[in-house]
Amino acid sequence: MKLSYQWLKELSGVDWPPEEMGDRLTLAGTACEYVTPTAEYMRDAIVGHVLELGPIEGADKIKKAIVDTGADKLEIVCGAPNVAAGQKVAFAGVGAKLVDDFVIRKVRIRGVESSGMICSERELGMSDDHSGIIVLDDDAPVGAKLVDYLDYDDYILTFELTPNRGDSMSAIGVARDLVALTSKKLRRPQFELIETSTPASGSVKVTIENLEDCPRYAARIIRNVRVGRSPWWLRKRLLACGMRPISNIVDITNFVMLECGHPLHAFDLDRFGSDEVVVRSARDGEKFTTLDGQEHTLDPQVLLITNGKEGVAAGGVMGGLDSEVEDDTTSILLEAAYFNPSMIRKSRRKLGIVTESSSRFEKGTDPNGIEYAINRAAFLMQELCGGEVEKGIVDCYPSRIEKKVIDFRPERCNKVLGSNYTTERMKQILSDLELTVEGDGPLKVTVPTFRPDLEKEIDLIEEVVRIEGFDSIDDAVHTIGPLYTRIRPEDVFADDTRAVLTGCGFDEMLDHGLTHSKLAALFNPDLPQVKILNPVSEELDIMRNSLIPTALVAVGHNIAHRVVDVCLFELGKVFFAGQANDDWREEERLVLAVTGNSPQNWREKARPYDFYDLTGALERLAEHFRWPQFSYKPEKAPFLDEKLSCRLMLDRRGVGWIGRVDDEKARRLGIKQPVMIAELSVDGLIDTRAKALGFEPLAVYPAAPRDIAIVVDDRVPAGDIIESVKKAAGELAETVEIFDLYTGSQIEKGKKSIALSIIYRSQTGSLSNDQVDEMQKKVAADLEKNFNAEIRDK
Amino acid sequence: MTLLEEVARLEQEARERISKADSLASLKEARIYYLGRKGPLTAILKSVKDLPVDQRRQVGAEANKCRVQLEAEFTEAEKKFSDTAPRQLIDPTLPGTAKRLGARHLITQVLDEMCAIFHGMGFEIAGGPDIETDYYNFTALNFPPDHPARDMQDTFFVEGDRLLRTHTTPVQVRVLEKQKPPIKIITPGKCFRNEAISSRAHVAFHQVDGFLIDEGVTMADLKGVLVAFCKAFFGEGLKLKFRPSFFPFTEPSAEVDIQCFLCSGAGCQVCKQSGWLEILGCGMIHPNVLANTGHDPEKYTGLAWGIGVERPAMLKYRINDIRLFFNNDLRFLRQFI
């Protein structure tokens, strides 16, 4: 919303400079975003007189004008369609700065030297109107500064109001805050309406069928108006409020809305189609054309103003095309109504239109401010359009909306705020805001109907503090709180996971969690999806059901940007809908993805990232969190290559998947290099460390290390070999590790050589060589038996 | 030539050798020649005792002075050639070979930093679902149905009558349903807004909302908590401005601006010449919210705030495009190892 600085000054009597006025209002909750001068691009313009106008040879669009500037008579080339000899015009000479910082220079056009410009409103920064030049009144003094002649030295205050403050969507509303900030008195406009003896009730009847959505509808009849251009003072006000002047009747309704915040609508009574107003809900499928020429198909969410037969306006949102005021209109049906804010919201959403009217009605107008608004507009139509106002308001208002009375306890106010305002000061602030304050102890505060946002004591407390300012409250230096603040296990888990994985060289990625249904289906065709009903784009139409596609998008992004060595992880949620109310599932998962080569240095060559980079990181996590050992069970996942696709098992429970991403699917994301990926659900794995961590006495007896090397069929899983050794050696085997693996020309084809190192140790005594040899024999025998292993270097 | 003359000549000759020396070796050779046990100066000093008594003193003093002088000059000259450090066994300038560290995402880091500050003030973390119901996201937080306040937060709606939470404040309701005051909680997490993706806006962002409810909690406590937070996070000495605002779930409500820490309030591009940066919203918990969850709003009062993570992170680290946070471009991520 834009308002004129001069206007606010007039209404409030507050004469702070424009910037300060904006800042002070902002600090009182009436947020002023910008303050801009109206006349910035008018400063150099003067009143000029077009003495002569003649054609230019070879040009039909432009003409040559001789303009008297008071000091000079200059030749000017002008292309405006409405320029004429004898006109007083807005003239800018050479060197003048116009809108967009355009500086006028002497130019030669078609052989004519042009020494200035006759200006339009747009060129002077007054509006966007560039349809023709500004034509001034005939008595404008030639040579006078235009800004002085037009009295246009003003500022536009642009407000970004919060949705609760319907009351401040007008000049009087904002002036009320200014008055409260300075304890001055609001200067309401005074006027005297003269009515004819003809009763308006003879010209129009009003019936409201839907009182819930329209509790009040008032109408006035104004006859014999002359539609034309508004006087300058009115156009100036509208321009300084960012509104385009249209015609005196429309300008008056807009002006009164800007002044008091109540939207009005003027119908052409002769085009209205009847002498009755019937307010009712629109019918399903009913058609209606708004005055912007758009045809709408309605439903009962829209409240329709009708002439008893068909719609003439979408109540509170926009008027209809057929009953619009035109140049030849002579009789006006002036509407001032109060609409239910939530109906307006539904209606304007249905219609897809936001207007100055709808945004005011939606935030709540004053049902009892209607008399002022309708009388003020009728008065102006009488003064400015020669209108004759018929006697009385035809007012349908069967149940009056009354003022609320709220108890206000000054001590409660100070208790909530931590302030120490005096009761006197609080009373004064509330009265300055035009609330009525009575009584002692708990004050009885009567809230006028222009403040529907004030419902409870706490709302009044806010009024007090916003006028007094938050600076009037000291900052506390300590607060209430517990002696001990717990850190949740899931936060410890997340932090530790990040520490372990970044320590392993993985970079953390973060996705917003929205993804494309088709992408998700490509990777997990059988997983259910949670659909977003109003997606911002087709590509983000579901909540993700796996971390894998989003991780691969990140991998693809990096490869596309020539970062081909990628080692990423993410901790994030996946989402599954439920049938009943409470079985919606949000599962915390971890994804790891590697592709390209490992980092290299002068000692270690780069090598392709592979499966073991993932299992290595997982095993580090298992070690830290004291999880049991992971195992990898070959099983096909839809998104993995069948030659390397495993269920990730923990304690014989499937917790996720690990393997190589299916090449074809990866290619769909622009990835043409192998990617290894693992995803696991971490729910249930988060507080394992704290539970399992414990001290074991340091070993007292010496260790007995032994190695064993075997040759086996290369399809025998290493994990099985280790298990066999552990089982054979029993509790005496402290550790079993593979320290060498070989396949190649030195051994038979289809075989592999594996070397294991076993450390034997007893907690109860030193092991003798014989005891250890005995164990080794048992280990070897089991390996031979279980895997048909050939024991080397026996 | 007298011995005194001889000393002077040796001194001059040695100086010439020092100034002309082109290596440490030649200097060392010269030092040995002039000052060594078999050198001419030593010979003169040795011969002093054989001189007549009247000469002994003078020659001895001069020769000794010359020796001390030359010693110092040789030492000084040798410094030019010798490395200060002793020769090393290996080349210590080769890069070290420890495993490369990964980077935590910057949002994680900033989120953790914010949580740590509030944890230090005694706030505990609570969480809730990203997919919420209208009740927790709006209704229980005093958003009337069909009120324009709902337009303040462009909402993604999800099938099954759900929505993506537009703030983390729904967790406040969930906590209030289960706990009795005193309650001192922060609710960090992801939220969603249905906004076109641009350099300034994204469909998702993070928040650290928080609240404190007890008997006697005041707006002064709210200001104190937030002033302390801003000092800890943005730096000491910055001014804060509390502006009245509107959120359905707090009353009175305020927005907090901090003095622009890039220009110290003088006005710059980042603060659009205003000298101030909008940083968070806050207020006293609306009595309706307390009543909706079964707490007596006469007995208890509460303070609450909501601060975004992305915007402060962008301001603090001068990041000009919010999309960088979700692109997962390693050239971005690895800047914050």
Image (cartoon, coloured by chain):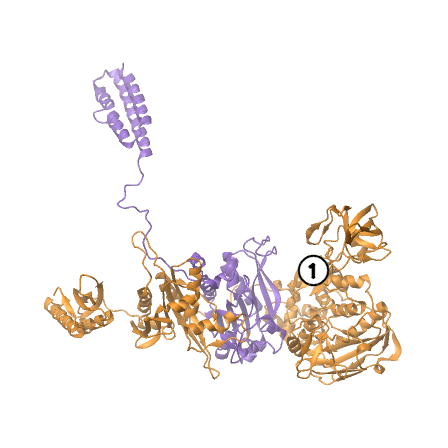
Chain colours: A orange, B purple
Mark 1 — on which chain does it sit?
A: A
Above or below, A206 against A143 in this view is below
Q: Amino acid at mark 1?
A: Met
Q: Could you tell me if residue A207 is visible in this image?
A: yes
Label count reads 1
x then y, percent, for residue A87: 84, 55
x then y, percent, for residue A544: 45, 72
Above or below, A193 against A82 in this view is below
Disc 1: which residue: A21
x then y, percent, for residue A63: 79, 52
Q: Nearer the viewer, residue B87 or B93?
A: B93
What element does badge 1 sit on? helix
View extreme (front): residue: A58
Above or below, A61 against A203 in this view is above
**Quadrant occupied by the C terminus of chain B:** bottom left
Residue B127 is left or right of residue B281, and the answer is left
Quadrant housing residue A756: bottom left
Residue A650 is left or right of residue A511, and the answer is left
Quadrant housing residue B86: top left
x then y, percent, for residue A212: 69, 83
Above or below, A599 against A301 in this view is above
View extreme (left): residue: A770
Q: Could you tell me if residue A45 is visible in this image?
A: no
User: Which residue occupies 24% across, 25% down?
Assistant: B33
View extreme (right): residue: A197
User: Which residue occupies 75% across, 50% down?
Assistant: A44
Q: Nearer the viewer, residue A373 or A92?
A: A92
